[in-house]
Image (cartoon, rainbow, N blue to C red):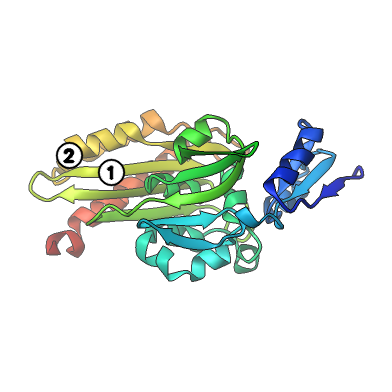
Amino acid sequence: MPMKTIQAPESLEEAWFCKDNAPDDSLWLSGTTWLRTQWEAGQLNDAKQWIRLDRIPELNQGIHLAEEELRISSMTTFAELEEDERIREKAPIFSKAIKQIAAPSIREQATIGGNIATGIGDSLPALIALDARISYDDHLKRRELLLTDWLQEGCPGLIVELILPKTEENLSLTFYEKTGRREAFIPSAVTVAISGRLNKKSGTFSHIRAAAAGGTMEPVRLKQLEQSLMAVPLVEGKHYRLLQEQILKDYSPPEDPFLSKSYKQRVASNLIIQNIHSYIEGDHYAAE
């Protein structure tokens, strides 16, 4: 491996100074678990300058509640997130995702900012389902975008905080499902997440967010599915085929050496339909 210059700035200003000295040959470092995965796969970024982020105060503020929103600093580890009661109470779908990401020893080191910054982290579908926002620093200018917009803009700047808005009241359907290996800190084969509130009288959702990802693809919102769930009464089982068709319109994962595109689509579709069906047919719905 070629020699690297490792910088350890103690402020955002210093971090950008280092980055601007080699704008096309620098790599931000947070928990470094993804870096290890890339190295093991022979895909390590060959940037000559690595910039550590662990000494920057603004990125190490932990988890706090502000105006009913959870604000999570980018250097917060998955282990810290897993242990926080506020995450379990206010963002259960995110809490479930955290427990399914990598092994416990890796969660001790891996950071939420690093997972998001990859653009393909397994936390992303759950965060999209929660309408999460990203607060990021762009050369000492603080900006904020919906996570979906931030991803579409190419993951700009340096992530400072993840913001989870106040949870919609009475969310009646929430689920997160991941298929694939868990032992390593690698992307899953397929990951899906949904959060929504059902109107029992109409059988349709008054609020719904759905997302899917997997492998090396950037997560996508399943907007066609969302529209159908808000328009078509779920109590009519015959509409499941329509929902499946809507999923396939939005979810187009790349093939890889082990899994075909059509297989991944079937898995995502089956996971979503099964969870919706179980909810509609189960005691939870009947008891509402």
Looking at the rendered image, the quarter that the C terminus falls into is bottom left
Whether residue 94 is visible to the viewer of this picture, yes or no, is yes
Classify mark 2: residues with Cα within 10 Å, few (<14), some (14-19) or many (20+).
few
Q: Nearer the viewer, residue 56 or 200?
A: 56
The earlier-in-sequence mark between 1 and 2 is 1
Image position of 16 (left or right of 231): right
Q: Residue 148: percent from the left, percent from the top?
A: 45, 37
Mark seen at residue 222: none
Residue at 79% x, 41% y is 18
Percent of width and height locating residue 185: 63, 55
Circle 1 crowding by C-alpha within 10 Å: few under 14, some 14–19, many from 20: many
> Does 8 appear above or below 228?
below
Secondary structure at numbered mark 2: helix
Q: In this rendering, is residue 68 above or below 22? A: below
Q: Is residue 192 left or right of residue 139?
A: left
Q: Residue at x 42, y 61 (%)?
A: 65
Residue type indicated by callout 1: Ile
Total marks placed: 2
- Give the number of the disc on residue 208: 1
Q: Are marks 1 and 2 in contact (CB under 8 Å)?
A: no
**Outermost residue, left side:** 201
Q: Residue shown at 17%/39% (left/top)?
A: 238
Residue under label 2, please give it: 238
How far across and how far down the image is residue 64, in percent? Answer: 47, 62
Does dot 1 land on a helix, a strand or a loop?
strand
Residue in the image at 54% along x and 32% along y:
254
> Could you say where residue 143 lies in the image, as x and y percent from the top left?
52, 38
Q: Quadrant of residue 173?
A: bottom left
Residue closest to the eye, 280 or 46:
46
Q: Residue furthest right?
A: 3
In the image, what residue type sits under mark 2? Lys
Alpha-carbon distance for marks 1 and 2?
A: 20 Å
